[in-house]
Image: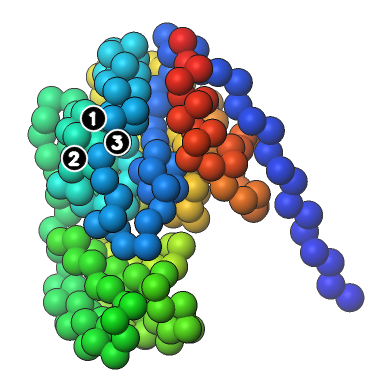
Amino acid sequence: MSFEVAVVTPPAPKPLRLSEVSLFLDLDGTLAPIAPRPQDVRPDLRRTRLLVRLGRALEGRLAVVSGRTLEDIDRILDGSIPCVSAVHGLVRRDADGEVRRVEPHPGLAPAAQALRAFAGRDPGLMVEEKGASVALHFRLARARAAESRLLARRLAAETGLTLQEGDMVEELRTPGPSKGDAIRDFMRQAPFAGSVPVFAGDDATDEHGFAEVARQGGFGVLVGRPRETHALFGLRNVEDVLAWLESAR
């Protein structure tokens, strides 16, 4: 006999008291709606103004922690956030502007070549190369989902790359720091050190971040459908996230 584990909808978080916290935010699915193609996500004046206000109120204790490249994050957020962790923790820009990048794994080139060959079979498939990782998006080719996952698993086994599964995307990344590691490293430095970390994210890739902020006495906020998670609180969608951030004082 088997039993299903009940997934409880987490409560919504109370408005943040900005004097006490450091705030870490995912981008896609958290600050911006997920688009059919990554390049379809564009700057938004409301979001940019909100982030600028939060950054000032937090005295710099604000960072975006995303799977996107550093350049793409700056494009979408109008360069409004100095502290950024990109490519799931493999790239990090600190408060002083210094950028740290993990050296790309040699298996990325053959993996990218194999993914491009596969993507050539269907115009709905898209390969995104991020320097330290390569991603296969199949949101516009859902009938290829099973094939995409099988190919990504095979390439991970053959190359030694780390497989990271996301929402309609399979990503092969250089082994190295996670989002949780990036948050831990930020929290060791000024201006974040000594505050309570809070992290909002939507995807399975954000669970490392939720676990890390919990370990440091903070909490996570899961955006989207309830699931088993390390986050203590939940919000339904991007609009709810923006409203919650706008209520912070």
Q: Earlier in the sequence, mark 2 or mark 3?
A: 3
In the image: residue 29, left or right of residue 118: right
Residue visible at 49% across and 55% down in the picture: 204
Does the rendering let one see residue 9?
A: yes
The percent coordinates of residue 177 (x first, y second) are 30, 51
Q: Secondary structure at mark 3?
A: loop
C-beta proximity under 8 Å, tags 1 and 2: yes
| Above or below, comparing residue 166 to residue 186 in the picture | below
> Which residue does the numbered mark 3 point to in the structure image?
44
Q: Earlier in the sequence, mark 3 or mark 1?
A: 3
The amino acid type of the residue labelled 3 equals Asp
Residue visible at 34% across and 30% down in the picture: 47
Q: Secondary structure at mark 2?
A: helix
Q: Secondary structure at mark 1?
A: loop
The quarter of the displayed image where residue 138 is located = bottom left
The image shows a total of numbered marks equal to 3
The amino acid type of the residue labelled 2 equals Asp
Q: Nearer the viewer, residue 244 or 91?
A: 244
In the image: residue 57, left or right of residue 18: left
Residue count near mark 3 (Cα–Cα under 10 Å), binned few <14, some 14–19, many ≥20: few
Q: CA distance from mark 3 to mark 1?
A: 14 Å
The amino acid type of the residue labelled 1 equals Ile
Does the rendering let one see residue 118?
A: no
> Which residue does the numbered mark 2 point to in the structure image?
74
In the image: residue 134, left or right of residue 27: left
> Which residue does the numbered mark 1 point to in the structure image?
81
The quarter of the displayed image where residue 164 is located = bottom left
The percent coordinates of residue 215 (x first, y second) are 51, 34
The quarter of the rendered structure image containing the N terminus is: bottom right
